[in-house]
Amino acid sequence: MKILKFDIDGPFVIEPEVFGDKRGYFFESYSRRALGAAYKEAFGRDFGVDFVQDNESFSRYGVVRGLHFQKGEHAQAKLVRVVSGEVFDVAVDIRPDSETFGKYVSVVLSDVDKRQFFIPRGFAHGFAVLSETAVFQYKCDNYYCPYSEGGIIWNDPAIGIEWPLPEKDMVFSEKDLMHPGFDESIINES
């Protein structure tokens, strides 16, 4: 397992060791021990995240989900991966005291490379489906709480996410189209 860092402190990508032959492949999609050791080697501190819930979604090409986050005591860290297909995944720093507040990182995840993306608490998260369909799974370190959810509109110019899809191909839920902009969303968190 290899950990790839970003310029923003917190999120990182995991490249698992995949064993393949003519029969197919095998890899550990999650090992608390292996992740803890790789994290300590990469960052010099303990990982300290305990996942309590797994979620899965199925989406078609062009679907954009997000940008979502959980507030306060219900904040969630996520470990996301694509079981089938390919997505563009993004995390936006919404930690008010962070030097990278309002900045984002992104990564393409697919069933081919089997990479995973860790998004810590204090980040909004979203993804766009690049393949015909995608099965997306993620682990959370806190249970979902509907009254603690928040969101940021996908195309807020204050963040400037460069989505790799033409806008005409993007498909949203009505709820995701109603999210406020970054500044308004963060003010509402106070």
Image (tube, helix red, strand yellow):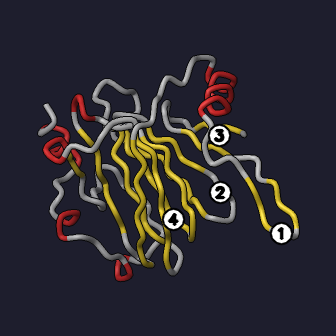
Can you tell which of label 4 and label 1 is closer to the viewer?
Answer: 1
Q: Quadrant of residue 142?
A: top left
Mark before the other along the chain sequence, 4 or 3: 3
- Residue position for label 4: 87
Residue at 34 percent across and 38 percent down: it is 76
Mark before the other along the chain sequence, 3 or 2: 3
Discs 2, 1 touching: Cβ within 8 Å: no
Identify the amino acid type marked 3: Leu
Q: Quadrant of the N terminus?
A: top right
C-alpha distance separating marks 4 and 2: 12 Å
Can you tell which of label 3 and label 2 is closer to the viewer?
Answer: 2
Identify the amino acid type marked 2: Lys
Disc number at residue 15?
Answer: none
Identify the amino acid type marked 1: Arg
Can you tell which of label 1 and label 3 is closer to the viewer?
Answer: 1
Q: Relative to the observer, which residue lies in front, 27 or 178?
A: 27
Discs 4, 1 touching: Cβ within 8 Å: no
C-alpha distance separating marks 4 and 1: 26 Å
Q: Is residue 14 above or below residue 81?
A: above
Residue at 64 percent across and 22 percent down: it is 40
Instruction: Give the x, y percent position of residue 99.
Output: 39, 27
- Residue position for label 1: 23
- Residue position for label 2: 114
Mark before the other along the chain sequence, 1 or 3: 3
